[in-house]
Image (spheres, helix red, strand yellow):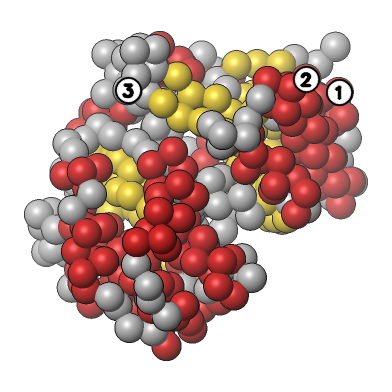
């Protein structure tokens, strides 16, 4: 069957849309083929509205209410464009699985909560396709962190009986999933390691008016400031025991602006130091894991940052690959994961990983907005 997976992450790059063909039988080993992948960048005004919605200082209920529908329409149009590109009608697509845009994630407060916006009813209305959304709330209701949600799909698609694998995604936030060769679904370890591209992008925007460090060229030209890196590596989140998740609430604009006020570095040194922080915090997270026959497989925008990848290889002393080395796509990985999660949602099969999220029990992730 054909399905569409959509992802828009903390980096605010835009809407990732993956058209996949997926096995429609309940099998131990799922089969997924990526037919097409497109990213629709957000317009600057949309990014600004999302950032305001994320900010405790600038957010308000009217903005969130309107943005919820605005993004829903954008998601619906993005999915519709993919369908039209391949001459597909609503009857040809089994479902759309959309992550939505996270504007706040607070799994450890008195009332653990998370909020992904982008109204699914708008997507269904535009496309005529059943839409699955809200993939985090059920796990939080069961006492989990609501994240990470991709380990279930990673085990299905990447587990090897011959070697240990660590799946890393470097978006705005970096996360990892450890798949032991002799492990099963219940033994998966997965958590957010800290910032991915988020702080690097903040420095690029402030000092260079660019969205990201293309290929890591700016980082390569700079010098890592060791006192600042030491302070960053002392961040309490890094020593916190998993399961754990984080986001802009911890490593976003408030943190970077405070650092910009406290330290006076050359622009290229800010980028280099933040890049080193991403590499070092990632590698520290799996430093105790066996390096014998270990593969580290990186996805997300960070996979295209050569300097970051080189520093991860140097710091970890592991075999570090990209998704492309395995015949997959670093950009499309999470959108594909949404499509895979959606399959199990429709089959009424639990698709969280309690060992990764800390949930008390397995639950079915996702809510369904059906066609009329």
Of residues 225 and 245, the one drawn nearer to the viewer in this rendering: 225
What residue is shown with label 2? 121
Look at the numbered disc 1 and give the secondary structure of its residue.
Answer: helix
Label drawn at residue 175: none
Image spot of residue 119 (x, y percent): 73, 24
Look at the numbered disc 3 and give the secondary structure of its residue.
Answer: loop
Label drawn at residue 125: 1
At x 56% / y 34%, what residue is drawn?
57
Q: Give the CA separation, mark 1 to mark 3.
A: 35 Å
The mark nearer the N terminus, 1 or 3, is: 3
- Mark 1 Cα within 10 Å, few/some/many (few <14, many 20+)? some
The answer to whether residue 257 is left or right of residue 204 is: left
Dividing the picture into quarters, in which one does residue 1 lie?
top right
Dividing the picture into quarters, in which one does residue 153 lie?
top left
The answer to whether residue 97 is left or right of residue 66 is: left
Label drawn at residue 108: 3
Of residues 36 and 272, the one drawn nearer to the viewer in this rendering: 272
Q: Quadrant of the C terminus?
A: top right
């Amino acid at each position: 069957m054909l399905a569409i997976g959509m992802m828009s992450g903390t980096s605010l790059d835009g809407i990732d849309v993956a058209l996949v063909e997926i096995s429609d039988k309940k099998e131990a080993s799922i089969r997924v083929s990526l037919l097409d992948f497109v990213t629709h960048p957000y317009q600057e005004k949309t990014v600004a509205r999302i950032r305001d919605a994320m900010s405790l200082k600038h957010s308000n209920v009217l903005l969130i209410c309107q943005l919820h529908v605005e993004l829903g329409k954008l998601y619906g149009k993005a999915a519709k464009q993919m369908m039209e590109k391949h001459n597909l009608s609503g009857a040809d697509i089994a479902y759309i699985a959309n992550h939505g845009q996270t504007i706040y994630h607070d799994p450890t407060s008195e009332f653990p909560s998370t909020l992904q916006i982008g109204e699914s009813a708008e997507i269904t209305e535009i496309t005529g396709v059943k839409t699955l959304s809200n993939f985090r709330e059920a796990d939080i209701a069961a006492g989990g962190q609501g994240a990470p949600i991709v380990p279930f799909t990673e085990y299905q698609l990447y587990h090897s009986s011959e070697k240990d694998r660590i799946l890393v995604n470097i978006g705005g936030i970096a996360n990892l999933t450890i798949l032991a060769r002799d492990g099963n679904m219940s033994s998966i370890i997965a958590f957010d390691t800290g910032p991915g591209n988020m702080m690097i992008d903040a420095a690029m925007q402030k000092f260079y008016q660019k969205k990201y460090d293309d290929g890591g060229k700016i980082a390569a030209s700079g010098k890592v400031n060791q006192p600042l890196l030491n302070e960053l590596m002392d961040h309490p989140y890094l020593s916190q025991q998993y399961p754990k998740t984080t986001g802009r609430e911890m490593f976003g604009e408030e943190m970077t602006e405070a650092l910009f006020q406290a330290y006076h570095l050359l622009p290229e040194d800010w980028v280099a130091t933040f890049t080193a922080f991403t590499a070092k915090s990632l590698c520290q997270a799996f430093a105790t894991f066996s390096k014998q026959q270990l593969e580290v497989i990186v996805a997300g925008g960070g996979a295209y940052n050569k300097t970051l990848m080189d520093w991860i290889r140097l710091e970890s002393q592991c075999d570090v690959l990209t998704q492309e080395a395995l015949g997959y796509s670093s950009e499309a990985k999470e959108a594909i994961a949404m499509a895979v999660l959606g399959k199990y949602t429709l089959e009424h099969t639990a698709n969280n990983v309690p060992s990764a999220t800390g949930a008390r029990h397995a639950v079915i992730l996702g809510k369904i907005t059906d066609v009329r």
